[in-house]
Image (cartoon, rainbow, N blue to C red):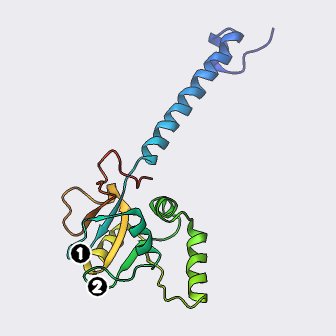
């Protein structure tokens, strides 16, 4: 007679053990999928300085602002884009959705533009959402983005901008992680 080598084998006939293992694996997979779906839906909020009269931007305008194709706001203030350092999930999502590129493509873009003589300035990079928010709050031409969870409701230090007419809480909002 074979000795049982785990607890499950003491209480289940051999045919049921496989089903039990499948049930556990399915539960773990589903729990992981729920976490991924939740993270995948987190909105990315575009913020500007409170003095900036802009309330809405198209995806095309947003791309131009972050790739230095537009250097001035309608007010005449210089555009000062800022983003978190490479590897931040919101940066990765933003670059993919808005610019159609990743971090390596962004570096190549600015290198090629500078090499061709185009006057471009890459976005300022900061290490935290609070530093990004402080930079935007203190710079009249600044524009940045962060996870919605990094901008508490009622925060009046910066202004959230609609994208394509939608706010981050709207169902049709396009900037999500």
Secondary structure of the residue carrying numbered label 2? loop
Q: Residue at x 55, y 32 (%)?
A: 28
Secondary structure of the residue carrying numbered label 1? loop
Tell me, yes or no, whether the two marked residues, 2 and 1, touch with CB atoms within 8 Å.
yes
Whichever of callouts 2 and 1 sits on the residue coming sooner in the sequence is 1
Q: Residue at x 34, y 73 (%)?
A: 143
Q: Residue at x 33, y 44 (%)?
A: 171
Q: Residue 44: x percent and y percent?
A: 38, 58
The furthest residue to the bottom:
117
Q: Residue 12: x percent and y percent?
A: 64, 10
Circle number at residue 172:
none
Q: Residue 128: x percent and y percent?
A: 40, 69
Q: Residues within 10 Å of mark 2 (few under 14, many from 20)?
A: some
Q: Residues within 10 Å of mark 1 (few under 14, many from 20)?
A: some
The reply, left or right, for residue 123 in relation to residue 80 is: right
Image quarter (top left, top right, bottom left or bottom right) of the N terminus: top right
Q: Which residue is mark 2?
A: 77
The reply, left or right, for residue 160 in relation to residue 81 is: left
Q: Which residue is mark 1?
A: 52
Q: Residue 173: x percent and y percent?
A: 36, 51
Q: Vertically, is 55 above or below 29?
A: below
* Residue nearest the observer in this picture, 19 or 146: 146
């Amino acid at each position: 007679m074979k000795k049982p080598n785990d607890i499950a084998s003491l209480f289940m006939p051999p045919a049921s053990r496989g089903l039990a293992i499948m049930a556990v694996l399915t539960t773990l997979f589903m729990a992981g999928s729920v976490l991924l779906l939740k993270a995948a839906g987190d909105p990315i909020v575009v913020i500007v300085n409170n003095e900036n009269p802009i309330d809405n931007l198209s995806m095309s305008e947003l791309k131009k602002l972050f790739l230095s194709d537009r250097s001035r706001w309608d007010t005449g203030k210089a555009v000062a884009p800022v983003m978190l350092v490479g590897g931040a999930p919101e940066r990765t999502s933003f670059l993919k959705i808005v610019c159609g590129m990743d971090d390596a493509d962004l570096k190549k873009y600015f290198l090629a533009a500078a090499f061709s003589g185009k006057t471009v300035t890459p976005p300022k990079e900061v290490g935290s959402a609070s530093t990004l928010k402080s930079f935007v709050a203190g710079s009249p031409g600044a524009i940045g983005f962060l996870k919605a969870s990094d901008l508490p409701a009622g925060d009046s230090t910066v202004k959230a901008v609609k994208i394509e007419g939608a706010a981050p809480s709207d169902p049709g909002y396009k900037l999500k992680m």
